Image: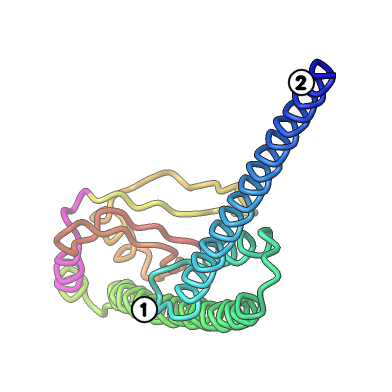
Amino acid sequence: MLLKIKNLISIRLVFLLIAAMIAVGFTGCQSKKKLARQQAAKELAEKIEKAKKDLLMVINDQGAMSISQKEKIVDDVKALNLNNEEVDALIIEAEKAIERHKKLEAQRLEEERLRKEREAAEQRKIEEQKFDKMEDYFDAIASASTIDIANMRINDALKFFASPEVPVLIIVYQDNEITDYDRPTTIKQYLEHLKDQKKNINRVHNIEYDTKGKIVELELIKK
């Protein structure tokens, strides 16, 4: 009888130990799950906070960031799928800011294009004026009433050139990228030719200058 009682006590103790171990294990498991949830919540909060900070940086940018940089930030935040109302609202604001930036950039590029066009037109006008001035000298030499007047005008014209030996190229044929030239000559020889022929059959096509503003190459084309 006493042995049975001892066996029953032993069995009960075993069950109690098992129950205690199960309870401890369950409690430990619950604690791990709780810690995991807390860690996940912390990480989510950090992601949300960083996302808001990044989006506000896009929204408040004053020109330090490029459009592509802003778009990447917004795309990266979207990819997180945070499902946060505040973040979603900031995404909308950031996208609006990017659109405003795009419009301003397009406007800037258009203004830059127009500015370059104006500068190019002004430069062409200046070049044309220079061309006209040189052609006036050529006409004046060809139409000079005396040799002395022609020589005086030749000397005046030569002042615009780096030297009397500056090459003069005369285009006789031009078609797209194909250009044929007459026999090359020098400015001194060309001006003497104008004096002798008493007519100017060419017009200025291009002028090359040195750093001092003197002509170093003259290109003519038949009128």
Structural crowding at the residue carrying mark 1, measured as other residues with C-alpha within 10 Å and reported as few (<14), some (14–19) or many (≥20): some
Q: Is residue 77 shown left or right of residue 81?
A: left
Considering only vertical position in the picture, is 101 above or below 37?
A: below
Residue closest to the far front: 1
Considering only vertical position in the picture, is 14 above or below 75?
A: above
How far across and down, in percent of the image, does residue 172 sit?
54, 53
204 or 113: nearer the viewer: 113
Q: Which residues are magenta?
A: 152-165
Secondary structure beneath label 1: helix
Considering only vertical position in the picture, is 79 above or below 96?
A: above
User: Label 1 is placed on what type of residue?
Assistant: Asp
How far across and down, in percent of the image, does residue 41 sit?
59, 60
Secondary structure beneath label 2: helix
Residue at the location (15% across, 71% down)?
A: 156
Which residue position holds label 2? 6
Structural crowding at the residue carrying mark 2, measured as other residues with C-alpha within 10 Å and reported as few (<14), some (14–19) or many (≥20): few
**Observer able to see residue 113:** no
**Residue 163 located within the stretch drawn in magenta:** yes
Q: Look at discs 1 and 2 and give the one toward the viewer.
A: 2
217 or 150: nearer the viewer: 217
Which residue position holds label 1? 132
Residue at the location (66% across, 45% down)?
A: 27
**Residue 160 located within the stretch drawn in magenta:** yes
Which quadrant is the N terminus positioned in? top right
